[in-house]
Amino acid sequence: MLLRMSSLFLRTLRDDPADAEVPSHRLLARGGYIRRAAPGGFTWLPLGWRVFRNVERVVREEMDAMGAQEVHFPALLPREPYEATGRWTEYGPNLFRLKDRRGNDFLLGPTHEEMFTLLVKDLYGSYKDLPVSLYQIQTKYRDEARPRAGLFRGREFTMKDSYSFDVDDAGLDASYAAHRAAYIRIFDRLGLDYVIVSAMSGAMGGSKSEEFLHPTSIGEDTFVRSPGGYAANVEAVSTVVPESIPFDGLPEAHVEDTPDTPTIETLVAAANELFPEAGYTGASTLKNVVVTLVHPDGTREPLVIGLPGDRDVDTKRLEAQLAPAEVEPFTDFAAHPDLVKGYIGPQVLGAEGKSGIRFLVDPRVVPGSRWITGANEPGKHVFDLVAGRDFNWDGVIEAAEVLPGDPAPDGSGPLELARGVEMGHIFQLGRKYAEALDLKVLDENGKLVTVTMGSYGVGVSRAVAAIAESTHDELGLVWPREIAPADVHLVATGKDAAVFEAAQSLAEELVAAGLTVLYDDRPKVSPGVKFKDAELLGMPTIVTVGRGLAEGVIEVRDRATGERSEVAVADAPAAVLAAVRG
RNA sequence: CGGGGUGUAGCGCAGCUUGGUAGCGCACCUGCUUUGGGAGCAGGGGGCCGCAGGUUCAAAUCCUGUCACCCCGACCA
């Protein structure tokens, strides 16, 4: 394949687009790879589309290799299947909903669990048909509140999604493992750094879920890792629970005046003034955070979270625990006189308490632990309030923020926090969708059994952005060979006809050998412009035919390392092929 | 969802305070010169000044609304 710059549909920009913040977005726009077409939607230009298809090809090859079969659904889907699983409403405002001319409801698919489940139900009915894994590479639509960072978070994007169908849990484990291995191969081939982290498992009851995160400072997900190899999404981190303490010998609770202590800092200062020998810290206090739970059916319920005062509630962790309910700030103190703003204490909380308000505590609140907390009276706090003796709770919740240095739950050392972007997600769905949509097969005894499923996704368009983000340098893009839009960027400089003839014949030889060559054959363009463009566009090998030709040499340069060498014209094709094929 | 900022040619920006012919650089076209690190000179084409209302003899400019984009925040008991 020969791409001639003189006729390629391409215009590079000298200045960064003002709305592009992250490097990948800036460089992809400047290099003429993508063009913004709508809020959260991009047009792929010829070079960009070549990169996109290369990523897609890697994904497709690995999915095929693991035995998954490719299908293709419409993006425009009817309401009914999504109604059956509750997601028509549960998905909320992120779902693009529309009506046809007769007034029937449709949606633009944000993900396709329902459709795959129904497809298998349509065609298969026996355990002998299973296992089967199906996938598609599809345009997905999510009405994001705030599309961001170019291709990283759009409202239209491309995802490879696959679904496994098995008759039993052992089968699901095998399908899950096969996908996991395929994903490792995919991200290795794409040249993307990744960390496999355990994702939410709690709320879905033991089902397994892992995310492939690409570590980057612009990432939207926070994850943790330990020196001993533990890695998890911050939402999935479980707290190391301290030992319970016997009540014997613990002091009695006592109420103290603590005026003007609206924050934990001021409260700790006041406490240490009252009892200088105690050495109180934020972790000695129990703060009781009120939120409003909004259930999917619209009912609202106040909920109090009790947690050590040195930690804030992590909204993402909280919501992950409470899903599908959503959390909103609590404002309605007027309707709940038992809640004394700023001085809420657990004595009035819980199903058994005076207020009857549900009270969940952090796992660190174990029986026998002693706390300074609100006395349910303005200006007063209670000290030495003992959990399990002086107050009780309705349950335990992992809602406190995870802090650097917290112990890893598997004992592998202190945790560090890092940011990442989700590139892939593998998930044991279990029987949720199969049950909702009644996907059953006959087993070997002729009995109907519900199929168990997994769902697995890779962000294809996002991977393009992540690769650009992770490999660029100050001059421009630096594509890994596997996904570069061309193998070689061949630059002809000067105005000498001999240069263009030599470059042309080299280009033809390389193309004949199977390479894709991006040939800068533009006449009357100065060398500086051509070199800058070559660096911006980021082909892995840059070959220059120019002033060296008089001495019978051309220059071969590696975009990533900057290494350059001169080779004799006659040896050039072989030298370039060697560089490209490593 | 809240706060702040910005919308003027393909890209980057000025003009708006004080209403009166829409400008600059890059890119694009023509000619001449130049050709190893984003060339020079001369000439040229390209604008619903985000959109919709309003005020005015007259609106890019003032007012109202709306949409979009960018940034920050999302709870502090």
Image: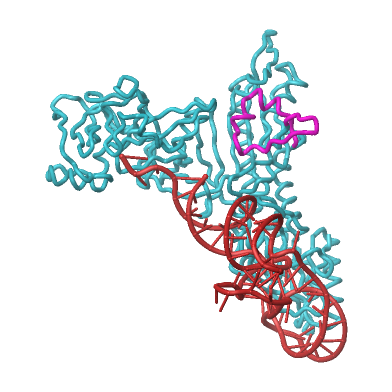
Q: Is B24 left, or right, of B6 in this rendering? A: right
In percent of the image, x 52 and y 30: which residue is there? A324
* Residue A98 appears anywhere in the view: yes
Q: Point out residue A164 in the picture as x, y percentages from the top left corner.
A: 66, 29
Q: Closest to the observer: A580 or A187? A: A187
The chain letter of the cyan chain reads A
State the residue at coordinates (63%, 26%).
A453
Q: Foreground residue, A103 or A460?
A: A103
Give the colour in which the image draws chain B: red
- Nearest to the observer: residue A574 or residue A78: A78
The picture places residue B34, in percent across and down from the top left corner, at 77, 89
Query: Which contiguous range is marked in magenta?
Result: A76-105
Report the side of A518 relative to A174 (left or right). Answer: right
A289 in the magenta segment: no
Report x, y in % for residue B43.
82, 86
Say if A362 sits above or below A487 in the image: above
Q: How many marks?
A: 0
Corner quadrant of residue A24: bottom right
x and y percent of residue A96 in the render?
A: 67, 38
Please say whether residue A102 is one of the residues in the magenta stretch.
Answer: yes
Residue A534 seen in this snapshot: no
> Does B36 appear above or below A536?
below
In the displayed structure, would residue A407 be above or below residue A218?
A: above
Q: Quadrant of the C terminus of chain A?
A: bottom right
